[in-house]
Amino acid sequence: MRVIPCAVPLGSEAGNWGQGVKDQQTASAALLQRLSEDDESLLDSRDPKIDSMLIERLYQSSFATRYVPIPMLFGAFVIYQDYLTWWHIAGIGLLYAAGTLYLDRLRDAYTESGGYDTTTDWGMRFAIGCGATGLSWGLVGWFGYPPGDFALQALLCVAWAGLTTSSLNTRAMHLPSFYAFIIGISVPFFARGFLFGEPSTVGMAFFGTILLAAQCFCAQVNNRRERLSAALRLRNAELIGEIDRARHAAETSHAELESAHHMVLADMATLQRITQTGSWHWQAPDGEVAWSDQFYRLLGLAPQSCPAALAAWLDCVHPDDREIVRAHYQRLRHGAARDSVSFRVAGETAKPRWLQSIAESERAADGSVAWIRGLLRHEPD
């Protein structure tokens, strides 16, 4: 059924909801601007959620490379067997195996808890395991140090550089774990070089120290980048949550408005049927015409049996009164503020049935007619 649209007052609750949505959109737009600018002010506060995200990524990224150094450690035992006793090999191997197994158990426990066990400092526990594996390599550099073999000393430097660089890539997101590993591997290695090395070895240790400082600086930069990335993902998730909540609120409000609209239409249809009145309207700029179901019935037609148009209306009017109705319609189209006519329904000659059309027009800002709204009823006696 098509009827004349009517304004339904929504009250203060709808106004408050609209203001709330507007404020939420403003806040979301400001947050989106911060995200697009890569705003580092997101790191001003220490959010525990960011630390949790970094630790979870630490556990995921480090697992793939955890067993890769084992063949390297075995190769180091073979290369430096002339400088290592079996007690050294057994102790270092046991320490590395214990540290690696500890990290594996820790990863399993972290996975089972889902990372939601806030009573456990997962990051510090991981740092302890990193310190153990790093110290294993540091002890190889201390006990396997060849005093007079520059080539093997250089090989130790290359191995140290590769391991620390790998740690920079996998542990820099959690600085305590990175520093625990880097201290464990570097202190014994550089201490032996500075204390007991020849001038060439001291030179390598010196330049290695500079490289170590550069790696620590890079770790700080990488950590800040990782924290910023985590903060942006977190804020992005919050933004998506805000959008989802706003969408849900809009959908809920839309459903409520739809329900209220259908109730108004149903009430209007009932009232028109009881009072035997019909409604019609014309709307610019496309000239759309709509009749209510009761308008059809008053003209002797089934509801929605034909398109709502002036020609269909005139077909239902007594031939002698058609010009009256047409003039009524034209006066309204040309700007008459209010007009009314009475006419007879066609085909009823014994006792004609008289109807009355009362309508008003509404002008737009430019003076043209924007709306015509009318009422059709039985002619009063």
Image: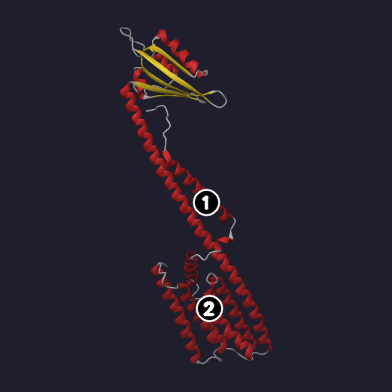
Residue lying at 53% horizontally and 78% vertically, measured from the top left: 180
Residue lying at 41% horizontally and 9% vertically, measured from the top left: 321
Q: Is 294 displayed left or right of 361 in the figure?
A: left
Q: Residue 161's x, y, as percent? A: 60, 78
In this view, 318 is above or below 266: above
Q: How is the image coloured?
A: secondary structure
Label 2 sits on a secondary structure element that is: helix
Q: Is 372 displayed left or right of 208 in the figure?
A: left
Q: Nearer the viewer, residue 110 or 253?
A: 253
Label 1 sits on a secondary structure element that is: helix
Please name the amino acid that badge 2 sits on: Ala
Q: Residues within 10 Å of mark 2 (few under 14, many from 20)?
A: many
Q: Nearer the viewer, residue 85 or 207?
A: 207
In this view, 152 is above or below 333: below
The disc at residue 205 is none
Q: Nearer the viewer, residue 216 or 117?
A: 117
Q: Residue 275's x, y, as percent? A: 32, 22
The disc at residue 180 is 2
Q: Nearer the viewer, residue 125 or 91?
A: 125
Q: Quadrant of the C terminus?
A: top left
Q: Residue 24's x, y, as percent? A: 49, 49
In this view, 210 is above or below 150: above
Mark 1 or mark 2: which comes first in sequence?
A: 1
- Foreground mark, 1 or 2, reads 1
Please name the amino acid that badge 1 sits on: Ala
The disc at residue 27 is 1
Spatial separation of the CA atoms under disc 1 and disc 2: 41 Å
Residue lying at 59% horizontally and 70% vertically, measured from the top left: 220
Q: Quadrant of the N terminus?
A: top left
Q: Residues within 10 Å of mark 1 (few under 14, many from 20)?
A: some
Q: Residue 317's x, y, as percent? A: 39, 12
